[in-house]
Image (spheres, rainbow, N blue to C red):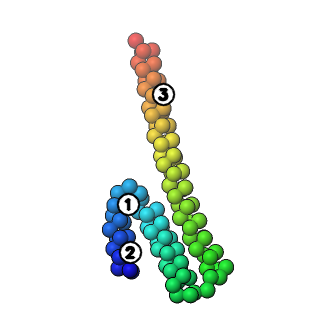
Amino acid sequence: MIFVTYGISFTLLPIVLKKIDLSITYAVWSGVGTLVTSLAGFCYFDEKVTFTKVSAIAVIILGVCMLKFQEGESEKEEKGDTEAERMLTEVVGRSKGQDTMASF
C-alpha cells in the first residue's frame, strides 16, 4: 500500500507543478502526507489521539491555507503593478505628446 501511494504522489507531483508554484505544491504535499500518516497511525496502529497531535496537524493545515491565500494576494499585487505601469505609460505618453505639440 505504501508503494502505491508513493507512486501516485510522485506521479502527480510533476503534473501539479505545471499549474501551481513549487512552494505551495510542496507545502500541500507535505501537509497532506503528514495528515494521512497521522490518520493511519490513529486508525491502524492504535496511536493515541491527543490534543497536541490534533493541534499540530491543524496548524500545518492552517499554514498551507495561509500560503495559498498569500499566493492569491501576490498575484493581485503583480496585476496591480502591471496596471499601474500601463497607466503611467499612458500618462507619460500623453505628456510627451503635449510637449511635442507645445513646441510647434
Which quadrant of the figure has residue 20? Answer: bottom left
Residue farthest to the front?
44
In the rendered view of the protein, which quadrant contains the C terminus? Answer: top left
Q: Is disc 1 placed on a helix, strand or loop?
A: helix
Whichever of labels 1 and 3 marks the residue nearer the N terminus, that label is 1
Q: What label sits on residue 5 in the rendered view? A: 2
C-alpha separation, residue under disc 2 versus residue under disc 1? 16 Å
Residue labelled with disc 1: 16
C-alpha separation, residue under disc 2 versus residue under disc 3? 56 Å
User: Which kind of residue does numbered mark 2 sit on?
Assistant: Thr
Side of 14 relative to 32 (left or right)? left
Residue at point 50%, 71% (across, down): 31
Q: Is disc 2 placed on a helix, strand or loop?
A: helix
User: Which kind of residue does numbered mark 1 sit on?
Assistant: Val
Q: Nearer the viewer, residue 4 or 15?
A: 4
Side of 103 relative to 57 (left or right)? left
Front tag of 1 and 3: 1
Q: Pointer 2 and pointer 3: residues touching (CB < 8 Å)?
A: no
Label 2 crowding class (10 Å Cα cut-off): few <14, some 14-19, many 20+? few
Picture coordinates of residue 38, whole percent (x, y): 53, 79
Residue labelled with disc 3: 91
Q: Nearer the viewer, residue 23 or 15?
A: 15
Residue farthest to the right?
51
Front tag of 2 and 1: 2
Q: Is residue 2 above or below residue 29?
A: below
